[in-house]
Amino acid sequence: MYKRLLSLFIVWILSSPISFAQKIFLPTKESLATRPVPPWFGNAKLGIFIHWGLYSVPAWATPTTTPDKVKDWRFFYKNNPYAEWYLNTLKIAGSPTQAHHKEVYGAGYDYYNFADTLSQNTKNWSADSWASIFQDIGARYVVFTTKHHDGYVMYPSKVNNPFFDSKAITSKRDFVGEVASAVRKKGLKFGVYYSGGLDWTFYRSPITNLWPDLFKSIPKSVGYTAYADAHYFELIHRYAPDVLWNDVNYPENGDVLGIFAEAINANPDVVINDRWQQHKDLTNFSTPEYVVLDSSTKYKWESCRGIGYSFGYNQVETSKQFLSSGQLINMLVDIVSKNGNLLINIGPKSDGSIPEGQLKPLLDLGKWLKQNGEGIFDTSPWRRASLVLQDKTELRFTRKADVLYIYFFSNPKNKNIIIPDCKLSNDAKAVLVGEKNEDIKLLTSNGSVQLRLPEKNPSSGTFLVKLTGVID
């Protein structure tokens, strides 16, 4: 009997993802509060969000306006620009999505029948092609949608849904595992998105007003809580994610502390976002959506948004809705200067291909980062995030050791640039970063620094000056 127990214990040790050299955290606030934040996330700066699922088949929404600018939430949800909300929007009487669905598929066509189409369309898709693109973009991590609000699970889960035939809402193919393996082979971190507080297989009434309908719609049953908890533990044990990205809060009676402890013990590098409604003091970063903060904060943050107005692929979107390459570059620089990361979303088509309108600005960002990324990755905020010159030229700052990185969003008319409150060592040096780095003149006076840019426009877009020898 004892030999049998001992042998089972040895097998458990050998198969456990936990190293006994690492600290084990208990599912208590006291234990989890002692855990330091892994430094990789603060250094990573750029991540790729992927919204891909059944909603990628109809791929339809009305691109009315971005969520940060909308004023009438009732109008917004009838004309929701988020294509991943297709199932909710088609249930709203009189919505354009409802009319579209009736015209294209028929009024009685079941949304979950799109699973067969997704399966057929992805036969030739390979996660390796994505991973190569993400590497070219310069991303450091990827967050993949494992279950969105529609309840469809993008991996062969063994957790049974009490209200639906689990086979109808569960992928036979392990999309999550394939993406995790592919991006990790390229040296990128991998995270999982999970809609913990909203699941339309449990809550079936359409949400017609964001406030307060959205958070009232969180399933509160013991059954749903057990379902969501089981999914999280399954995701942790299968994929040991580097990021836990929960959405729309979480049931109050859920095992949040247990999920946190399990994730950390399985992967000491894991970081956890703030959208749980509870235990925010134990989470690692905030997640403003389609919003960039006005100033730098000590608490780490991550801005998430799509290239257009939608996260899921929306065939109706055009270049009018897409960020330009320059806008995307400036957005990343602005966010990083304020202690943030940018989690920029890709919404692939149902066959896994990435639409050209989304891909071009991302690849342009990657090319720009190859030359100018030194001042983005592995940097910290400086004492000031920004400076606006007299001619309205905007500057952004980042810092690494004794190097100050100065990003110019445009070429200033006055070539003499004053950087106030900046002290330098005697061997300080300024370089205009480019294909051929160019030394530029540097003067100091009364605690300020004067840079002399060349008369010729150094760039048609955002460019970088590297200032070495900063001592404060």
Image (spheres, rainbow, N blue to C red):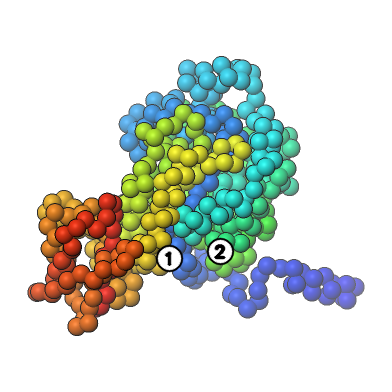
Residue 304 higher or lower than 205, as above or below: below
Could you say which quadrant of the image residue 27 lies in? bottom right
Q: How many marks?
A: 2
SS of the residue under disc 2: loop
Residue at 60% x, 46% y is 146
Rendered image: mark on residue 187 = 2
Name the kind of residue labelled 1 in the image.
Answer: Asn
In the displayed structure image, the side of residue 425 where residue 68 appears, left or right: right
Name the kind of residue labelled 2 in the image.
Answer: Gly
Looking at this view, is 118 or 220 the one in front? 118
Residue 252 higher or lower than 398, as above or below: above
Work out how far the residue at label 2 is from the one at label 1, CA to CA, in angstroms: 14 Å
- Circle 1 Cα neighbour tier, 10 Å, few/some/many (<14 / 14–19 / ≥20): some
Residue at 51% x, 36% y is 313
SS of the residue under disc 1: helix
In the displayed structure image, the side of residue 423 where residue 255 appears, left or right: right
Residue 363's x, y, as percent?
A: 45, 50
In this view, which residue lies farthest toward the left? Answer: 446
The quadrant of the rendering that contains the C terminus is bottom left
The residue under label 1 is 43
In the displayed structure image, the side of residue 295 where residue 328 appears, left or right: right
Labels 2 and 1: the sequence-earlier one: 1
**Does residue 115 show up?**
no
Looking at this view, is 328 or 75 the one in front? 328
The quadrant of the rendering that contains the N terminus is bottom right
Residue at 16% x, 59% y is 455
**Does residue 313 show up?**
yes
Could you say which quadrant of the image residue 420 lies in? bottom left
Residue at 65% x, 74% y is 19
Residue 344 higher or lower than 419, as above or below: above
Do the numbered discs 2 and 1 sit on residues whose CB atoms are within 8 Å?
no
Residue 442's x, y, as percent?
A: 16, 72
